[in-house]
Amino acid sequence: MSRRALAPVDEITTTARSISMQNLTQRLTVPRTGDELQRLSETLNEMMARLDSAFRKITQFTADASHELRTPVALIRTTAELVLRKQRSEVDYREALQQIRAEGERTTSLIENLMTVARADSGVETLPLVSVDLAETLREACEQGGMLAAAKQVAFDSAVPNQRVSVEGDSQSLRRLFLILIDNAFKYTPPGGRIVVSLNTSDGFAISEVQDTGVGISAADLPSVFERFYRADKARSRDTGGAGLGLSIAKWIAEAHHGEIRAQSTLEKGSTFRVRLPLSTTTVRIAQQN
């Protein structure tokens, strides 16, 4: 009798031991007994589903990262090989070195972004949140990002209040978030276009927006823009220099600040990226008193 009673446990044990990285999609047969064995089987299946999902993400991340790194490394190697095939002029050597340096900088930026994504995935990367003046942080990002305006022939305006807007956050990470959005706007806004950055408060939240009159994003692509390595216009990705990591990092930063980021866009009309962050309690109290 005891052997018969333990038979389902033996079956669960045998099946669980047979599951490996090569067959993570395999699941235990769940006995419809309404007892501990059913709950155990369901719990183990849920655990294996999580492991399967995590393993797939790791595999996809490795493949995507390898693909993104292959291009700049190949360009560096090809440029060096071409310039070394025969004697060149000083101008030719300088141009080759400048191209190699540019690809090296692009590779460094990509590696830094990959490290940020990896730390975010690990769940151990936490940001030191202190009282930050979001208005000042956004003004700094506008000042830095706005340097591109003349070169890109794009009008750049900011509507950021002079008074302090306090949030609990990490100023360096928030500045990076806004620079990602501003840089993205410049990448996809043609000459003669316009970019507007704004900040206001509403219902206990600071709401920042980066609006542009750029090429826009299709309705089909919009839900995926915050996914890593995703680029709506893959044909332009090399020209814009993006690896499809910026917006996923921006999303992580916003969520690490207990906030959110959303996008609205219309093809050929432009896009709006909106960041919503909770105000610090001090700011909320002042707003309520006013």
Image (cartoon, rainbow, N blue to C red):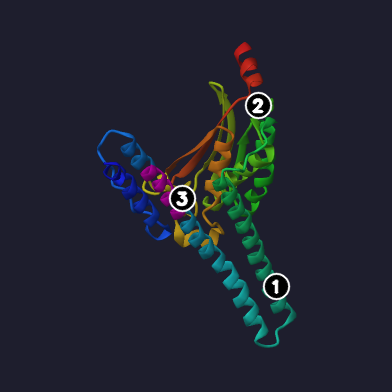
Q: Which amino acid does label 1 sit on?
A: Leu
Task: Name the foreground residue: 24 vs 123.
Answer: 24
Number of labels in the image equals 3
Name the secondary structure under disc 3.
Answer: helix
Tag 3 residue:
54
Residue 63: x and y in percent read: 48, 62
Asked which quadrant contains residue 283, the reply is top right
Q: Find the residue positioned furthest to the right.
A: 90
Q: Look at label 2 and name its amino acid.
A: Val
Foreground mark, 3 or 2, reads 3
Looking at the rendered image, the disc whose residue lies closer to the viewer, 1 or 3, is 3
Q: Mark 1 points at which residue?
A: 97
What segment carries the magenta color?
A: 44-56
How crowded pointer 2 is (Cα within 10 Å; few <14, some 14-19, many 20+) is rated as many
Q: Which residue is drawn at 60% across and 58% down?
A: 110
Q: What SS does tag 2 mark?
A: loop
- Image height of 177 relative to 159, above or below: below
Residue 17 shown left or right of residue 112 in the figure: left
Q: Tag 1: Cα neighbours inside 10 Å, few (<14), some, or many (≥20)?
A: some
Q: In which quarter of the image is the N terminus?
A: top left
